[in-house]
Image: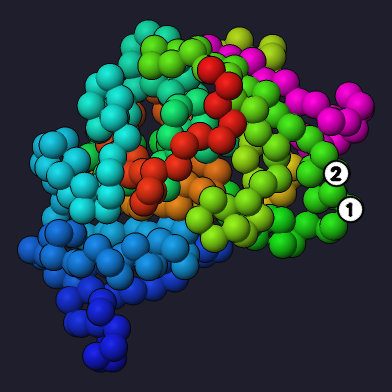
């Protein structure tokens, strides 16, 4: 790129679209660090494309280096463990987040005092080809735009009441399925996809209840929502490569995880960046 007005213009990296949504910046050659790219144009790209992948750059050896970089993006979510979540499979997990199972669609911060605007993931070690473990992202504004209005009207009648107890919280959140992006007001979906109650391999089921329609219509709402969220036209499954840095728009997207081979060396780090100002969780009951 040679356009002087483009702050990312230069010959040292390449910018390409991701299908079906998102944008990738690939380093051309070795020795470029993600810190070498100014944050302001990256923030603009995340706003426009909802997912930004930085690939082939030098990243961060230690979690506190990743955390310090993320502070350039905004205030960080603080957890009992600090700001960096180490996503590694545990041998006897007490929650599905640390298992190798699939992770249902959800939004980050749904059970916390504040909802992060961005997620930053660093892939410390990829799970390896053929081992699964893709992080899945659904573009909910696109889903709403491309779904027939009667179906969206049915979804809009439904409210989810979500209760989840795990190591870091025991919270109840109430949210309409169809709501608006807290920054620019575009329609978005907030939904935690139910798992089958008889899925005995799924560790620590949350308690999810939905109201607003009779049960038989709710069944159809879940079916049609799931079909739309996982439609390849709206779903991006990120195949991790070691060194990837992925930054996402948590207010527009829902995300989950494909199951992976137990014992595969999948290691991600995740930091949550709060908005400016931070968004108090509108649905948190306790
Ligand atoms: Fe998450």
Instruction: In the rendered structure, find residue 22 and report the number of the disc placed on it.
Output: none
Residue 221 lies in magenta, yes or no? yes
Look at 39% across and 67% down and name the residue there.
Answer: 45
Tell me the quarter of the picture where residue 145 sits.
Answer: bottom right
Residue nearest the viewer, comparing 3 with 228: 3
Residue plotted at (43% across, 34% down): 114
Residue at left 41%, top 52%? 248
- Of all residues, the one furthest to the bottom in this rendering is 3
Circles 2, 1 touching at the beta carbon (< 8 Å): yes
Classify 69 as above or below 18.
above
Mark 2–mark 1 distance (CA, rounded to whole Å): 6 Å
- The segment highlighted magenta reads 203-223
Q: Determine which quarter of the picture holds residue 16.
A: bottom left
**Vertical placement of residue 250 versus 159, above or below:** below
Q: Secondary structure at mark 2?
A: helix
| Quadrant in the picture for the N terminus | bottom left
From what the image shows, is residue 191 above or below residue 211?
below
According to the image, label 1 marks what residue?
A: 150
Residue annotated with mark 2: 154
Residue 3 shows in this picture: yes
Q: Is residue 137 left or right of residue 88?
A: right
- The picture quadrant where one finds residue 42 is bottom left
- The image shows residue 227 at horizontal and vertical percentages of 73, 45
Residue 224 lies within the magenta run: no
């Amino acid at each position: 790129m040679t356009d002087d007005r483009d702050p990312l213009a230069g010959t040292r990296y390449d910018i390409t679209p991701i299908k079906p949504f998102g944008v990738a910046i690939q380093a051309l050659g070795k020795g470029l660090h993600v810190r070498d790219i100014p944050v302001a144009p990256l923030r603009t790209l995340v706003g426009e494309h909802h997912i930004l992948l930085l690939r082939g750059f030098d990243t961060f050896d230690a979690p506190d280096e990743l955390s310090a970089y993320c502070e350039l993006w905004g205030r960080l979510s603080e957890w009992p463990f600090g700001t960096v979540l180490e996503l590694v499979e545990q041998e006897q997990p007490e929650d599905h987040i640390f298992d190798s199972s699939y992770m249902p669609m959800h939004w980050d911060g749904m059970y916390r005092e504040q909802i992060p605007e961005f997620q930053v993931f660093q892939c410390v070690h990829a799970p390896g080809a053929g081992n699964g473990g893709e992080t899945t992202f659904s573009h909910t504004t696109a889903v709403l735009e491309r779904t027939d209005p009667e179906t969206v009207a049915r979804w809009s009648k439904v409210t989810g009441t979500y209760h989840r107890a795990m190591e870091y919280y025991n919270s109840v959140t109430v949210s309409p399925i169809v709501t608006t992006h807290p920054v620019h007001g575009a329609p978005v979906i907030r939904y935690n996809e139910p798992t089958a109650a008889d899925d005995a391999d799924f560790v620590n089921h949350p308690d999810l209840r939905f109201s607003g329609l009779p049960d038989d219509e709710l069944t159809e709402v879940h079916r049609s929502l799931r079909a739309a969220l996982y439609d390849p036209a709206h779903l991006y499954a990120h195949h991790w490569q070691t060194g990837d840095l992925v930054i996402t728009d948590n207010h527009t997207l829902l995300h989950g995880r494909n199951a992976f081979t137990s014992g595969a060396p999948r290691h991600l780090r995740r930091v949550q960046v709060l908005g400016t100002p931070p968004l108090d969780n509108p649905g948190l009951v306790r």
